[in-house]
Amino acid sequence: MNEPIIARHWLAIVAPKAAPAIATSTVLTLGRIWNANGAEHSVGNAALMVVLATGAATAGAFASAGRGGDPVIAGTAFAASGGLALAGVAGYADGLSLPLLLWALATAVAYGLAARYWRTDRRATLAHHRHTAERREEHGHIERVEALRAGAQIEVARSGAAYAEQLATALVTRAALPGFNPKALTDAGLPELPAVTEHE
């Protein structure tokens, strides 16, 4: 019934919150490294990134279309498309202002999308904790009722045993009185009592 309390490490708490910023910063850094290694104003490299980003966006659109759309695949494809577009701009542009502007925009969009999933996850976690607490309370109530019922049965058994003991003592005491005639009781229709033997 008692669940262990698990304290999460601070990195486990911070890492999911920092993941969108780390991802977009990594893409910006790799794009700028690519820029320094010859991608600046390279039409071929820019065309390649446009084709890859468009392909990823198209895959995301197909994955999200219809009733059987998979939101995880669609989200991954759209994130890849945005990352490729950011890397392409960071690699092709000669200045740093446009890549930084796109990095800030991509980070804001990533946090906006992640916040939605975090809210859903938090609601699911709270619902699970609430359900667990309700079940624990229900089981505790059942245990308390069963404990009371068992205690009442024990008390009834004790009182029955005490009554039987008192009745036996009264019968023995009555049989030991002078002038007691068990035959008269039997003739009156009462159950026959054991005969009392006189000890000399």
Image (cartoon, grey):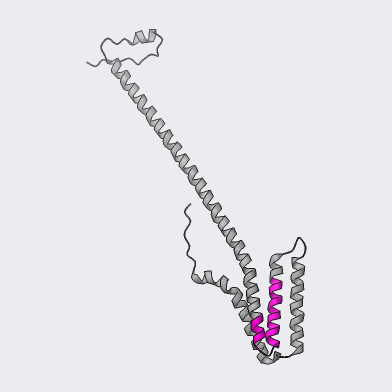
> Is residue 119 rendered magenta in the image?
no
Q: Which residue is depicted at the point 53% across and 69% down?
A: 13
Q: Which residue is depicted at the point 70% across and 84% down?
A: 89
Judging depth in this view, the residue of 187 and 101 nearest the camera is: 101
Q: Give the range drawn in magenta.
A: 76-101
Q: Which residue is depicted at the point 70% across and 65% down?
A: 71
Q: Main secondary structure of the magenta part?
A: helix
The extreme left residue here reads 200
Query: Is 160 placed left or right of 197 in the picture?
Result: right
Looking at the picture, how far across and down is residue 17, in whole percent? 57, 71
Looking at the picture, how far across and down is residue 97, in whole percent? 65, 86
Whether residue 149 is situated above or below residue 43 in the rendered picture: above
Q: Which residue is depicted at the point 68% across and 81% down?
A: 86
Work out which quarter of the rendered image holds the C terminus and state it: top left
Judging depth in this view, the residue of 114 and 63 nearest the camera is: 114
Looking at the picture, how far across and down is residue 144, in whole percent? 46, 42
Query: Is 36 placed left or right of 154 in the picture?
Result: right
Whether residue 101 is situated above or below residue 156 in the rendered picture: below
Choose top left, top right, bottom left or bottom right for residue 127. bottom right
Whether residue 164 is situated above or below residue 181 in the rendered picture: below
> Is residue 77 rendered magenta in the image?
yes
Choose top left, top right, bottom left or bottom right for residue 21. bottom right
Choose top left, top right, bottom left or bottom right for residue 76. bottom right
Number of numbered discs overlaid on the protein picture: 0
